[in-house]
Image (spheres, rainbow, N blue to C red):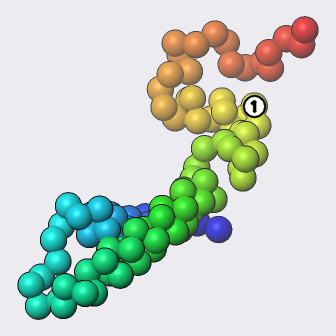
Amino acid sequence: MKIPPKAAFIFGLWTTLLLLVGGGTITLPLGIPHDWLDYIKSWCVFLGAINSTVLTAAAGWSGPGSGPLAKPPTYSEARDIMTQAGIASKAEPLNQAPAKQ
């Protein structure tokens, strides 16, 4: 499952906004009753923490690299990646698998 980069970007901006309001960096408008401010800030911090967790999980789930949720590339896939990146000519011969020790 891949998460669209635009969706992750928008969700990340929303999370940042929540944390900035919750931390007091961004002040809320004067039209909000003073009694509500502590509740709003608390909810912003709470939701921002949950959103940060979701963003971290989403990055691990849909990231292209190897990690706990993605297997490492095979030798032929790695060779193709290096060839496309133009670094295969600078490396040792890639036409054979590395020697087993």
Q: List the residue tagged with mark 1.
A: 75
Q: Nearer the viewer, residue 9 or 21?
A: 21
| Residue 29 in the figure: left or right of residue 91 | left
* Residue 69: x %, y % from top left: 72, 52
**Residue shown at the point (60%, 60%) measured from the top left:** 57
Most extreme residue toward the left is 30
Q: Is residue 15 above or below residue 71?
A: below
**Residue shown at the point (25%, 87%) measured from the top left:** 35
Mark 1: few, some, or many residues within 10 Å (few <14, many ≥20)? few
Q: Is residue 85 above or below residue 37?
A: above
Q: Nearer the viewer, residue 48 or 57?
A: 48
**Residue shown at the point (31%, 77%) measured from the top left:** 38
Q: Nearer the viewer, residue 31 or 12?
A: 31
Indicate the quadrant where residue 11 lies. bottom left
**Residue shown at the point (12%, 82%) measured from the top left:** 29
Q: Amino acid at mark 1?
A: Tyr
* Residue 86: x %, y % from top left: 47, 26
Indicate the quadrant where residue 94 lies. top right
| Residue 101 in the figure: left or right of residue 16 | right
In the rendered image, is residue 45 in sight?
Answer: yes
The quarter of the picture where the C terminus appears is: top right
